[in-house]
Amino acid sequence: MQSVPNRLERQIEFLIEIDKIKHIFRKTKLLDQSRFENDAEHAWHLALMALILAEYSNEPSIDVAKVVKMTLIHDIVEIDAGDIIVYDTEMRTLAQEKESTAAERIFGILPEDQKEEFIRLWREFEARESPEAKFAAALDRFEPILQNHLTEYYAWKVHGISFRQLQEKNQHIRDGSTTIWNVVQEIFLAAKESGNIV
């Protein structure tokens, strides 16, 4: 593409690279249980959740556009690092270094200003320190919880996830939205009372 400006060429190269995210499959199934969800579908769902559920953020003046950006880019690093279930603490710890390296490589395809913005947003999401990052992280955990609830707790049963693990690994939902956390608590209790988790 000789006539394409370098900036645009790099942006197109990035857009081609991130097509790979469609082939990264998660541990949760689609609601019809026909197959596993991929990372691209997960990100799309989270972006819409951010638009629809923003009123339930603990922070009333949250920057929804920033939350949407975070939800769309947060799992791009899994192109290189793969998807690790959040309940596997040991593997998640090992994955963090791979994800950081992946962020540098993949976002590094972009022009410098966009690379810096995306890495900053990705790190902010991972740190869960800003109101937007807290809310985006809450949605990131709420979506698979809702999926498990509506697919007869498929992933939780297959991976032997306990009520205690659900509580421990998802507490940060409360930091982003106490309202969503209350809904999550009802889902966890229903799973336990039905005997689907211990």
Image: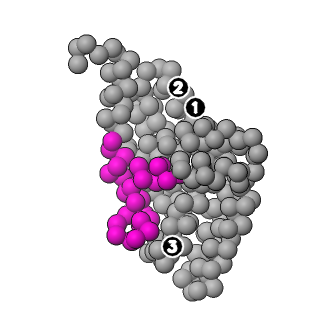
The one of 185 and 54 positioned closer to us in this rendering:
54
Residue reaching furthest to the front: 52
- Relative to 134, say whether 165 is above or below: below
Q: Residues within 10 Å of mark 3 (few under 14, many from 20)?
A: some
Where residue 120 is drawn, which disc sits there?
Answer: 1
Residue type marked 1: Arg
Rendered image: mark on residue 150? 3
Left or right: where 104 falls relative to 128: left
Tell me which amino acid carries mark 3.
Leu
Q: Name the mark nearer the viewer: 3 or 2.
A: 3
Near mark 2 (Cα within 10 A), the count class, few <14, some 14-19 or many ≥20, is: some
Q: Quadrant of the C terminus?
A: bottom right
Q: Position of residue 168 (x, y in %)?
A: 66, 65
Q: CA distance from mark 3 to mark 1?
A: 34 Å
Q: Quadrant of residue 192?
A: bottom right
Task: Report the residue marked by disc 2.
Answer: 116
Q: Which residues are magenta?
A: 19-46
* Residue 66 drawn in magenta: no
**Mark 1 to mark 2 CA distance (whole Å):** 6 Å
- Identify the disc placed on residue 187: none
